[in-house]
Amino acid sequence: MAETTQLTRHIDSYIHSSSTSTHQVSSLDAIGLLIKTNALTLEALVRELDVYLTSTDTVIRSRGILLLAEVLTRINSISLDSKTIHSLVGFFKERLADWKAVRGALVGCLELIRRKSDVGMVTGSDAKAIAQYFIQHLHFQSLGLYDRKLCFELLDCLLEHHADSVASLEEDLIFGFCAAIDAERDPECLMPAFHIVESLARLYPDPSGLFASFARDVFDLLEPYFPIQFTHTTSGDAHVHRDDLSRTLMNAFSSTPLFEPFVIPLLLQKLSSSLHSAKIDSLQYLRVCSSKYGAERIAKYVGAIWSSLKDTINTYLMEPNFSFTLAPTDGIDFPKNEVVIEALSLLQQLIVQNSSQLVSLIIDDKDVNFIINSIASYEMYDAVSVQEKKKLHVIGRILYIFAKTSIPSCNAVFQSLLLRMMDSLGFSVSNIDGLKNAGILASQSVNFGFLYLCIELLAGCRELVILSEEKPGTCFTILHSSSDFLFNSFCSVLAVSADRFPPDPDIYIGVKGLQILAMFNLDVFPIPKSTFENILKKFMSIIIEDFNKTILWNSTLKSLFHIGSLFQNFSESEKAMSYRSFVLDKTMELLSLDDISLPFSLKLEVLSDIGMTSMKNMLKILQGLEGAIFANLSEVHRNLTSYDTAVQLLECYSCKLLPWILENGGAEEFILQFSVDIWNQAGNCMDFNSPFEEKGLLDATMKAMKFSVGCCSEESQNVIILKSYSILSSRTNFQLNDVQRLPLTFEKYDISLRDEGILLLFASVIIALRPKTHVPNIRGILHLFIITLLKGVVPVAQALGSMVNKLISKSNGAEKSDELTLEEALHIIFNTKICFSSDNMLQICDGSINRNEIVLTDVCLGMTNDRLLQTNAVCGLSWIGKGLLLRGHEKIKDITKILTECLISDRNSSLPLIEGLDENNEEHKGDHLARKCAADAFHVLMSDAEDCLNRKFHATMRPLYKQRFFSSMMPIFLQLISRSDSSSSRYLLLRAFARVMSVTPLIVILNDAKELISVLLDCLSMLTEDIQDKDILYGLLLVLSGMLTEKNGQEAVIENAHIIINCLIKLVDYSHKTLVRESCIQCLVALSKLPHVRIYPLRTQVLEAISKCLDDTKRSVRNEAVKCRQAWASIASSRSLRF
């Protein structure tokens, strides 16, 4: 009884119109679930629905039938016996005549037809009965959109699943479809309708059969839809895209060759349409239909298609890009144009299908013959008229397609057209072998047109060889015989054009031609080995001698790179060995040759590009680079040139070679050895205290070390850290074994430049280590870092921050008993006592000595009279805090508390711990600098660091750490700022909070825009005086810009519009940074879109301020000022507004 009551409630919920659509769907799902769980049978449901299914109320009857149909869609995986299916078919079939309930009948029939055999499917006789009843009783065009769509889907499904059964309907079936599609305009109905055409063509394939007699009628119904154009936006849940509908119509057009007499003329006619989409569709349809109809049927149209294609390509092909920055590996590069791409694809399809016809057409074509007969006059690119350039480009593209498509077409154009061009230039066609000994052409014999077409032919031929397993015959014979002639021709055009300025396309043609000649298939090798080596020699001579010809030099280097990359997987081939001999070895020699004028920076560019051709070449380059680096490092104290050279070599290694190695892998053994060798050099002979030492060499060495260690595995890093520790402990004055227990004083541990260099190099290793890499004597290193960070060695502070970021926490468990945990490290850092004696000695102790003892945090808070020491301590604390913040450690709260205390401690002097020291102006200045450093520490905490604590150096990074930090600090800063009664403290608090806001993700800022807007404006007003604040100012303007453009922030902006505008007006002439002025004016433009009553009173002030910006020294600012003036000048008077 309970189940019956529940079922009745679900049925009533669906049938009665008072229920929402959500409740109705839920009811259907619930009924379906009852049947799936065997709590209800389908027969019981039908009995329960009997009163609704037979009701005289059309609304109730239609809802009842639809309910039964929808339930069937939810139990399509439930097996039904044949008797039940037959009964349901009979019921829904008869309801097709009930136009009031037709939707339920269509849904039910469609769901029954879709059932699979394993759960019980409709029999062939029942399917035929549905189709017959469907065709006889339904008037398609009188139905609504959704019902028409169901009709087409039902007919499509019948043809898909029961084609043999409905085939006997013959004319009735086709007549019924024609009546259904006639005048149909809705895309959602046309999709299945076009697919039905395909099904009918498959169902009646006989060329003289039933469908043949209706082909014209069906095509007449399809023709108005081409080309597909949407004139309205599709509605409903199912959105039909134009391209999908066009593709379905194309499949219908190409479904049977019976459409050929009607389709091809239509497409050729539409190809001349001015409508861009019609051209593209015509070309696509022609390509597909040509393939489906076959060569025999298309043969009679080939001439017309050829003529149309030429005209289309001629119209839409644009000027080529003669630039190696844009050029592909092969061929000439043209701007992308969809019409040209489709036209060339169609041409390629026709060449494959109707090869002999197309070859005859191109050989006999008047435009092709005109170009070939006139080729001798096209000596230089600038000498060719615009019209003939266009023809040359079109013929070149066509020849490229002929050469790349098939072996017969490639052989034909080489034999017929290439030899004719050579004959036109006065070279004997009858004796090709004689061309092998052709000398360098005289400059007057150089011919751009001939070489241009040669490149297109060669590029197409090479692409054919790559993709084809069969080896071409005639074209390779011609190419092999004429290779020396072509080499000399391309060299000649370079000799003439390289001296011109500005450089012209002839340089591109010369270099590109030699490149393609050298890059033919490895196995086939169509040009002699001597020619290939001559090309390499020519390119290397340009690299060494013509470096002042920038375009020629750069394009040659790119060509050498492409040629070398070809041998990456064929390193033992004959060509690869020649490349290593003539290019790689010569490149290596450049490092040791001082008698050539090639600048050293260009030598390194060649070195890196050639190395990147393959891992094998890279390893050889690296070996040569390593030798050069260490040779120059050993000479830096005697030779200034060696110093500069070493810096450039290390920068090349770090910035160019290592990133490539990291991406491609496979050179870790070298990187490990290189890192170890640097440490050997550092311990033996590298002089960080040379007369030439500034920071360049040390910085470059540190960078190379960091990048190298970061690339290594944990195992390799263990080797490097052991080596670096041994050098640090044995070759410096640092007493690492005693650092934990002996007092350390400034005098005793005064760091020499050499010791500082080794320490910085060691810090670079620590920064790049993986979290699980073992660091020897880590406690001693930790104490050493604490001392040296107080001396202002920033990389050491960064290394300390990296250590606390990667150390294992006690809660996670340590693998070794002697391993330092994060908790122990933090205890050492924050609880180690720093002692001052009366003679200003600094030492670290364990607290047992009764002196003036303070910890690191006390130094940060200024409990010494040494403000430089305080500044260094704050800087170090910021990097420690960053390491903790990234990993989400709670200790960051204590660090930020210390930093904020520094900001608000506005005292004229510190309480002296050392008696006898008087306050002075320098003391006040130092105090301000220390507090300013505390403000900038928040930038360190929140910004993305490039030198450390990033993914590249394996930092532990918790997701959303910036968002969490901002959310925790915002209420603290807002409270401190509101309570601050000191101008200096307020300035520093605003500066610190500005640092935080400027790097916080905008979405977090927008959530609290109302609370932040006033503080943001205070920051903008306060930070305008100091030039050092210009970057902070720019960051804040970006935040404000985000508030102005995002909906979440606009409400806060509207409430404070007048204050914001007044603030921005003061910044439009900010002199210290152009981007500040630009952003400020852009914000004013955004403000002009706010409600009129909020901004109109300030219109005059804005226009006056902007008028001054129209004369700004920077064009970008002037342009933004013009936009701003137009935006604000267009704001109408409030009197003209209607409320």
Image: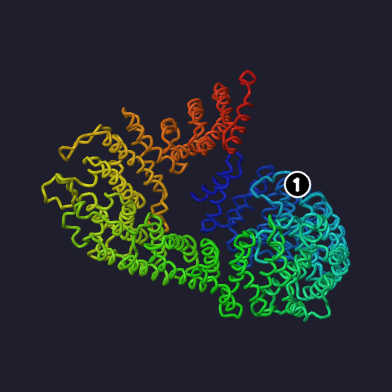
Q: Is residue 1093 above or below residue 414?
A: above
Q: In x, y percent, where is residue 272? A: 84, 54
Residue 1124 in view, yes or no: yes
Q: Between residue 1118 and residue 306, name the one nearer to us.
A: 1118
Q: Between residue 225 and residue 1049, name the one nearer to us.
A: 1049
Q: Quadrant of residue 561?
A: bottom right
Residue 200 in view, yes or no: no
* In the image: residue 39, left or right of residue 295: left
The residue identified by callout 1 is 143
Q: Between residue 407 and residue 878, name the one nearer to us.
A: 878
Q: Between residue 51 and residue 112, name the one nearer to us.
A: 112
Q: Quadrant of the C terminus?
A: top right
Q: Quadrant of residue 647?
A: bottom left
Q: In x, y percent, where is residue 835? A: 17, 48
Q: In x, y percent, where is residue 959? A: 41, 51
Q: Is residue 500 above or below residue 1080?
A: below
Residue type pointed to by label 1 = Leu
